[in-house]
Amino acid sequence: MSIDIDDAVRQTDFDALSSRLSCYLKGYTPQDNLILDLIPLIIYYQLISCQSEFKRFALSRKLKSLFFNIFPSNLLDINKILNFNNNEILSKINKFTPLKSPMINRGTYLRTTSITKNILNFCNKNKNLNKIQIISLGSGNDTRPFYILPKFENLSYFELDFQFTTKLKKLAILSSSKLSNTLNLNSLSLSNLPHTFENILSFNPSLNSSNYHLIPCDLRKLNSILNNDQFKYIDPFVPTLIISECCICYLSKDDSNNLISFWRNHLNNAEFLIYEPIGGDSSNIPNNSNSNYGEVMIKNLICRGIEMPTLITYGTINLQIERFNKLINIKNENNKFFDCKIWCKDMKWVYDNQIDINDIDRISRLEMLDEMEELNLINSHYCMIIASWKLL
């Protein structure tokens, strides 16, 4: 990946954050209330980190629009951001507010809810153990630690991402007592935080509390993980959930498979929870709708300067299962045996079989959805993978 492609991939995190904000404001995900505290602070530090005034102005307009122009008008005034009453935002939201479309909201709801449900299942089934851990790959500005960590005293949460991403998130967390308190951290006074391009540039991107760790690293360079001082906090012997929510799909085939194998070899009792698109069957069947959809997806990504190398390579449920069987269902170097299980379904199946009927009824009343057939098509081109192994 070039630097430009890395930037394009990082931008997808802002797109996902915008979709999650729309979901929250429409009432799909009421538990995600701290998203209103996180986003304006992320925007503030993103703008301050721009060296050029022109770039800062252009980016400010872009981000205000991306987040529906609902936050304080002067996003370069951190005091106004911290003192802004979120109820003012909520009071402005009505049926005329230009948020995301019902189809995008419903898809984001399914993605967010199904992943969170599996995270909670993992935590609940291990709640009587002394220690468990979650490792989130390419975590970006995910808000789950803020409402999941306080529920489980035995949980340690690790978020791994590019250095610039972890730096902005760390700054946002330390600027807000509401955010930092959920992670067993103390917020810092504004005078102890950087507010210039130069100071942000030299700011340490790592963050550690008793149960939360923000780790800067390049997931394509496994040595950068091993050589990171924070890696010592990861216990290879306790039950571990490794999350990839549209992360490893941006890596090359070799890099993504090496990353999977890396965690498989370093952890004795773990499971992957992976959400990513599948491009369909790559066979040259005339009018193959699965393949056609994948080709359209690839063209759309290219227009944004983004590559998704494994979209077609592992473009079906069967190909994903075959992939993980090869990478997970193996002996370790010392010939120890593991109990391995691989599960993979498309998100249409997840919606039809795993989302509570009462919750479906609840979200159906939030807004009208006319494009159910199109939503089903989209959901059938995303999958959820659970791949686990445990030392016998």
Image (cartoon, rainbow, N blue to C red):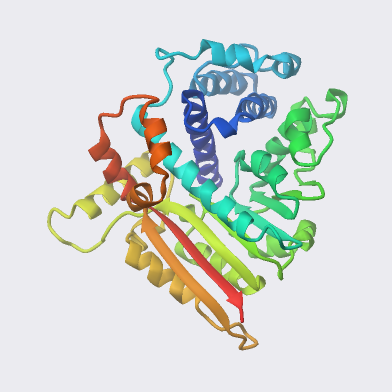
Residue 44 x %, y %: 67, 24
Which sits in the foreground, 236 or 161? 236
Q: To which quarter of the image does residue 50 belong?
A: top right
Residue drawn at 60 percent across, 74 percent down: 390
In which quadrant of the rendered image does the C terminus lie?
bottom right
Q: Position of residue 365 (x, y in %)?
A: 37, 26
Which residue is the extreme one toward the front? 358
Q: Is residue 63 above or below residue 239?
A: above
Counting from the top left corner in percent of width and height, residue 310 is at: 40, 59
Q: Is residue 54 visible?
A: yes
Residue at 63 percent of width and 17 percent of height: 86
Left or right, residue 104 beside residue 152: left
Q: Is residue 221 visible?
A: no
Total of numbered circles in the picture? 0
Which residue is pictured at 54% across the width and 62% down the height? 272
Instruction: Note whether 70 is above or below 348 in the view shown.
Output: above
Classify 15 as above or below 99.
below
Q: Residue furthest left?
A: 286
- Give whichever of 206, 361 is nearer the camera: 361
Residue located farthest toward the bottom when viewing the structure as drawn? 335
**In this image, 131 relative to 75: left or right?**
right
Give the camera-side residue of 373 and 2.
373
- The percent coordinates of residue 2 (x first, y second) are 53, 49
**Residue 190 left/right relative to 39:** right
Which residue occupies the foreground of this view, 16 or 156?
156
Query: In the image, is residue 390 above or below residue 359?
Result: below
